[in-house]
Amino acid sequence: MRIKRFVAHTLKEATEQMRKDLGPDAVVLNSRNVPREGQLSFLAKDMFEITAALDDVTPPRRNPYARRAADLQEQASATRAAGEEDPVESLKKVARQFQERAASHSGEPERPHARESADLEQLKHELTGMRGTLSTVVEHLKYDRMPALPEHLRSLYIALVNQDVDGKLASDLVQSVYASGSGADRPAVPGSAERAVLDAMAGLVAPAPEVKTRRRKTHVSALVGPTGVGKTTTVAKLAAINKLLHNSSVGLISADTYRIGAIEQLRTFAAIADIPMEVVYRPAEMAAAIKKFRDRDIVFIDTVGRSQRSPKELAELGRFMDAAEPDDIHLVLSASTSMKAALDIVDRFRVVKPNRLLFSKLDEAVTLGSLLSVASRDRIPVSYVTTGQTVPDDIVRVDPARFAKLVYSGDIAHA
């Protein structure tokens, strides 16, 4: 085996020297910065040194794409050692370039030679293996970026990230606990750090105040949101709870005249629950419908689902809300919605002026961490969460402490 060192102004130049001298099969053993010597060394840039080796035994013929992948991996390792580029970005580049090579190769016409077919099979096998390896390494580096913390706090950070709590938010939560000393320096006390993190999570959630229906003015609550989030079912639950449990007089208004069967669905419930209902087709009809219920304690308005990507539809929904002048506008978000999409919905539905968040379909979500980011970003009060289809069950008011436990555990049985 031949071992040789190469020194150059840049890592790339050193690598090219290595390839030129030792050939394409050379392997990088180590790379480092070499400071200049001399009286004026502080004015000069550091040099780069690569230690490489070449096996004297001629290797068997290898797939050219596998060789390229190995080259890229070596470059990524050398770059990381020299501190030039983020390791995760290096690995991503390796994956992208390797997949581009594989894609261009797969687009070529089939070759009749058995040797080329074997090369293609080998390429597929190596691509599968590399994907798994890169995923494992990137996952490790994601957690490895956490600042130095006691092991029990690092475990709490990982637990939060595994529940899809945003990485930065999870880091801030754990760091705040560490800085305050609440459970951070007492790992021997069972659950102390976990309780401190849960308290910090609860502090990010603003609970919506309970509606006091016994007053002169009728309280009007409207539910808005994208399609398919369960607004009509939730309206039925809220109406039933207020009538059966709180003994309030209730009225229903449906403005969901686009979805087939929506009005009939709510009308059937209203007939069973003996609750009066009005249907509104245009914003100009809203005031008259609400006036009919001026003797009621509370009125719930069901609206048509709107895409956050349609400004025209949102503007129309806004006109309905302006005409209704509701006391509460609950923006209903499905717990299965990703954090990025949910935050986008909140931003685009601002034209409707929601002052409450309501999280639905927790029973259909795999993890609930995204809800914490949505609830904490703008501090819009959270009113209810729903955990199933049963009316009037499967809905509870949000308590910050219980909500934090729910997000942390992902167990809706404790909702």
Image (cartoon, rainbow, N blue to C red):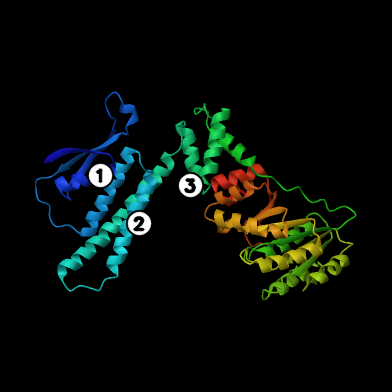
Give the secondary structure at mark 1.
helix
Give the secondary structure at mark 3.
helix
At a point 28% along the width and 42% down the height, the residue shown is: 11
Q: Nearer the viewer, residue 3 or 205?
A: 3
Q: Position of residue 124 (x, y in %)?
A: 27, 62
* Residue 96: mark in rendering: 2
Q: Give the amino acid type for the residue marked by disc 1 in the picture.
A: Glu
Which residue is tagged 3?
Answer: 162
Which residue is tagged 1?
Answer: 13
Q: Earlier in the sequence, mark 1 or mark 3?
A: 1
Q: Give the amino acid type for the residue marked by disc 3 in the picture.
A: Asn
At a point 27% along the width and 45% down the height, the residue shown is: 12
Q: Give the amino acid type for the residue marked by disc 2 in the picture.
A: Arg
Q: Total label count?
A: 3
> Which residue of the protein is positioned furthest toward the left in this rendering?
57
**Which dot, 1 or 3, sits closer to the camera?**
1
Mark 1: few/some/many CA within 10 Å (<14, 14-19, 20+):
some
